[in-house]
Amino acid sequence: MNDNTDNIIVDTATRIFQDLCEPNTVNDAEQGTWPKALWDALAESGLTLTWVPEELGGAGAALADGFAVLRAAGRFAAPIPLAETLMAGWLLTQAGMTVPGGPLTIAPVHGDGRIELTPDGALSGRARRVPFARNAEHIAVLARRGTETVVALVAARGLPISQSASLAGEPRDDVTLDRAIPEAISPAPVDQDLLVSFGAAVRLQQMAGALERILEQSVQYALDRSQFGRPIAKFQAVQHNLAMLAGEVAAASAAADGAAEACALPTIAVGEIAIAKVRGGEAAGTGAAIAHQVHGAMGFTYEHSLHHATRRLWSWREEFGNEAVWAARLGRMVAQRGADELWPFIAAGS
Amino acid sequence: MNFSFRFDPVELPSEAKELRREVRAFLRQEVEAGTFSPDGGKGSFSREFSRKVGAKGWIGMTWPKKYGGHERSHLERYVVTEEMLAARAPTRAHSTADRQSGPVILRYGQDEIKEKILPRIARGELCFCIGLSEPNSGSDVFAASTRATKTDGGWLVNGRKIWTSGAHQADYMIALLRTSPPTKENRRHGLTQFLVEMKTRGITTRPIINLTGSHDFNEVVFDDAFVPGSHLIGEVDMAWKQATDELAYERSGPDRWIETFPALVELVRRAGEDPSERLAEGIGREVAHLATLRRMSLSVAGMLQAGKTPSVEAAVVKDLGTNFEQALPDKVRLLAPPSGDASPDSNDDRFEEALRYATLIAPKLTIQGGTREVLRGIIARGLGLR
């Protein structure tokens, strides 16, 4: 949890978050104020185009670097569509398309999402709970054209958007595509299932960052807060809770690493994504509960910033497939391989 | 604030992948030859098997060649260890020496002892036990009172060790013995590590039968047992400085999360190819935990390879790992499809046996080698809380 790593991209992002993503920025964003200074600083440093190749105007960074930036964003609860913009950049780049500047998002975000591209080149369908749709200038849409899957880039302005929010207060809007004409279309490099898998890997990074944050906050709070004449950090029950929190944070971090590696393979390893989202999702729930217990009533106030991370953890664990969905899928994969292939399956992870 | 526990990802080198194939082929062959049974039915201790493993070069893998080692990486050693454990191979005759005792001798032992003992461990000829706990010194390791008193040419040992796994089978013990009283400044001062030959006159080993009905641990009584001066390991009175490294080796390996794994394997067998949603979800959750633990455990092996001493990370792996393996049998029990008179399942017997074993050994998993409470204390210290 050092603020300095040996990675200049991550260090740059972290500095920007430290300067421009204060607790008030996060609260203001929930009230509808777009954090312009934060977004502009990230855009100017090229971080919003982390995964876009240099020759296409991006930073051309490795997948791992972008994931590390998203972990930092998660630590600071950055209330901007950075993850979504990176995902859209990744999707468009994979499809060989030009990535526009400005905030982006992707749609649909659910495994059963279905947007049609009609023979006359118009998009039709409805995507629910699209993250930050109201803030996005463009949406990278995965659409069906007959039996083919394509990526369609569509301007967000003018699309009918019904606003809604996650339990963290982040925009999750329903977008209706009623004969919208895309600016560009290209055969898709992934199907809806792999897009959701990639989304899960992205959320896992944010979750790992948020968990690192609540561990820091909880340890500091336990050292600062005195009861019965001594810091609560000196009570063994509190120490053991924090040790368990540290374990969950470590597990979520390892899970996020696993998912990131799975995305770097020629074809995304869905089994590894499943493992990671199940374990990371559990860590989010267990970890947030411990952090709140340590913080007592103070952590339950809006004034304290603990909820910036914990509400996001509760929201992110649910997106791109929750623990139950991924666990059932993983269980079926294991069952189909059979009992004697269970160990080789686990050992194949590295 | 600076308390980063890092579990950096490790990519296994290509040698390790080839090695995994070799180990699997060897294990298959040994099962076919009847050396051991994959359901654990032939026990976990076999000197014959250990000698074969030694002949393969899979004991003392990371040690220098001049002491019979093979100068291979911790990651390669990790691969061998996990494949053996997953296959339930009978490694008990060499595993303690390979994991813990050998590295301690290598690091702190006198040259004469290193030359004499290490090559024999590497050949799979020597079995070790660990003499830490005493009747009044369990989790509080540094309260040990079994004494080593200076005598002509060596030391005389008097006292008792207890809960000593495999003492009745071991050739040697690495014992933690009191050579001086603790000081006011340092209550951990005054303990020394020794290499003790179990056949020494004055040592009596008595069985303590555990609740599974098996004889694994023992009480070891020392009555004026003589230990030669060359068997002193490290500095007199300073064992507390040596113990931390040892624990990083002991606490992070696959043996800290894989003990009840056979119950999960047999659940998958019972589940068949098309399990119910509930069963599939239950299996998936456990597999996710297991695979993540393995990733963390492998990461610790990577840190050892990089020359670090990841004591806190090892404690994290052991705490998460032993809690997982302890909880697993109960999860498996409640997930299993019903099997009654009307719907018997041909895999019932295997399943029941694996579940029975896992349920019975579960209580010890969060006690042996450092209790859950001790581990959480270590992690809390790593967090700067104490």
Image (cartoon, coloured by chain):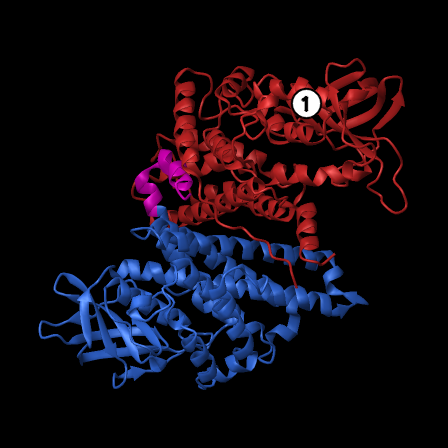
Amino acid at the residue labelled 1: Lys
Give residue A183's position: percent from left, percent from top: 20, 77
**Chain in red?**
B
Give residue B191's position: percent from left, percent from top: 82, 34
Left or right: where A274 falls relative to A182: right
Establish if B233 lies above or below B241: above
Q: Which residue is nearer to you in this view: B156 or B145? A: B156
* Residue at the far front in the pictured view: A55
Q: Is residue A22 magenta?
A: no
| Image quadrant in which you'd find residue A153 | bottom left
Left or right: where A246 falls relative to A238: left
* Residue occupying image coordinates x 26% and y 84%: A160
Give residue B274's position: percent from left, percent from top: 29, 43
Left or right: where B67 falls relative to B177: left
Q: Which residues are magenta?
A: A332-350
Give residue B201's position: percent from left, percent from top: 79, 13
Please state, as top left, top right, bottom left or bottom right, where the C terminus of chain A lies in the image: top left
Label 1 neighbour load within 10 Å: few <14, some 14-19, many 20+:
some
> Element under label 1?
helix
Q: In the rendered image, which residue does mark 1 sit on?
A: B114
Q: Is residue A348 magenta?
A: yes
Q: Which residue is nearer to you in this view: A206 or A248? A: A206
**Chain in blue?**
A
Magenta span main SS? helix
Q: Chain of mark 1?
A: B
Q: Does residue A327 appear in the picture of this structure? A: no
| Image quadrant in which you'd find residue A200 | bottom left
* Residue occupying image coordinates x 58% and y 34%: B361
Q: Does residue A319 appear in the picture of this structure? A: yes
Establish if B260 lies above or below B205: below
